[in-house]
Amino acid sequence: MTNTAFRLGTTENHLTPIALGAMNFGTQTPEDEARRILDHFITEVTPRYQAPDGTQARGMIDTADCYSWWDVRGEYGGHGESLLGRWFADAGTRDAVYLATKGTALIDDIDAVWDGDKQRDWSVIASHFVGASPTVLRESLAGSLERLGVDHIDLYYNHVDDRKTPLTESVGTFASFVAEGSIGAYGWSNVTTWRLAQIRAVAKANGWPQPAALQQQHSYLNRRAGLRHNSIVSDEQLDYLENYPDLQLVAYSPVLKGLFSDKSKRSGGYWAMDPYKGPDADARLAAVDKIAKATGATGNQVVLAWLMAAQSPRVLPLIGPRTFDQYLEAVEALDVSLTSEQLEELDTAGA
C-alpha cells in the first residue's frame, strides 16, 4: 500500500512519517544490527510513501558528530557518522536518505568529563561543548562530511545552543553553508522559544534562510510543573510553532526510552520519567494504557500514532532504537490508526 509522504515544514522534502535516529549505532548497537535496521528502513518502510507528484519519499536518518563519546572511554564520538558512511558506500543508499546531522556538542576536553573509569560526569558537560563559532562550525561540518563520505548534508543542526557566540556569526555561518551547497537547510536543537525568535529575527534582518527544523524532546507526557528545561517542548513553544509552520518540529525521545510499553520504567526513580512525574503523567499514562488495550497496539505505538496525527503543529517523531526489535515496534506504529474519539481522549487526558 502506498501512502502520502510527510512534508517537512514548508519545504519540498517529502519523507517517511517516522525518522530514524542513529545515536546508538556503532556503540550500543553493533554494526550488523545497525545495518539490519538501516536496510529495513530504506527498503521496506520508506518505499511505502510517495510525494504528491508520485516520486518516492526519502527516509530521514539523524545522527550527530558527538555520537556516542559517552559509550567509549577516551573517544570523542563520530561512531554513528562513520558507520553510516560505511553503509552508504556499501549499500548505495545515499539518494534514498534525507540525511541530518549536528554540530556544536563535541567535547573540547574528553578527560574533563569523565570522573574515574567508566563514569561520565554529566554535571560538567555543559561547560565543555565546543560551541558554535564560525571556525568550530566549519571544522565540525568538514569532519561530518568526511566521516559520512558525502558531499552534502540535507539538514545540519546546531545541537546545543551556544549563547556566547553572537547569532550573527552562528546563523550567518549556517546560511553560508546553504549558499555553498554543503547543506540543504539548517536547524536548531535544545533551545528556548525566546532564542528561536532571536534566531529568526537575525536571519530575516540579514536576508538569510530561516531554520527549517527544531529538534526538541517531545512526547505525550507534559513536563512537570515548575520544571525549567531548555530541551523539552513547552506549551509556549507549541504555540510558537503553530504560528511558524515553516519550522518543523522533529521530536526526539518520543517514547521516553520505551516507558509507555514498559510499566517498570514509570516510577519516579527512573531518569527518563523524572521530568514528567506527577498526577498529570499518571492520568495520561492511564489513557495510553486504555487505548493500547482497545487497539491491540503497544503503548509506544499509541504514542507514536498520536504524535503522527498531530496537525498544529505537525510532528515528525524521531525514534532511537538500540535493537532491531525496538525498531520494529516503533515503525509498526505506522499501521496503527486511532479514531477521532481516541485522539480526543488522549488529547484531553490529564490531572
Image: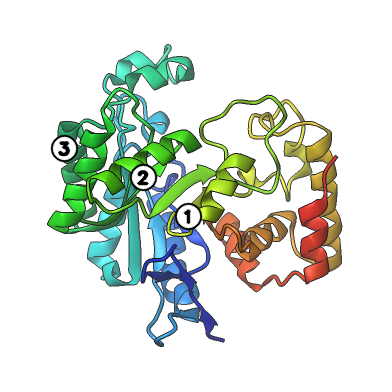
219 and 63: which is toward the camera:
219
Q: Is residue 298 left or right of residue 71?
A: right
Label 1: element kind: loop
Is residue 255 visible to us here?
A: yes
327 and 104: which is toward the camera:
104
Q: Which residue is mark 1?
A: 244
Q: Residue at x 39, y 58 (%)?
A: 61
Q: Nearer the viewer, mark 3 or mark 2?
A: 2
Mark number for residue 139?
Answer: 3
Q: Residue at x 54, y 81 (%)?
A: 3
Earlier along the polypeptide chain: callout 3 or callout 2? 3
Is residue 323 visible to us here?
A: no
Neighbor class of circle 1 (other Cα within 10 Å; few <14, some 14-19, many 20+) is: few
Q: Quadrant of the C terminus?
A: top right
Image quadrant in which you'd find residue 304: bottom right
Neighbor class of circle 2 (other Cα within 10 Å; few <14, some 14-19, many 20+) is: some
Q: Position of residue 111 (x, y in %)?
A: 31, 16
Q: Amino acid at mark 1?
A: Tyr
Q: Is residue 115 left or right of residue 107?
A: right
Q: Amino acid at mark 2?
A: Arg
Coloration of the structure image: rainbow
Q: Amino acid at mark 3?
A: Glu
Q: Is residue 202 above or below residue 304?
A: above
Q: Which residue is mark 2?
A: 200
Label 2: element kind: helix
Q: Are marks 2 and 1 in contact (CB under 8 Å)?
A: yes
Q: Quadrant of the N terminus?
A: bottom right
Q: CA distance from mark 3 to mark 1?
A: 31 Å
Q: CA distance from mark 2 to mark 1?
A: 10 Å
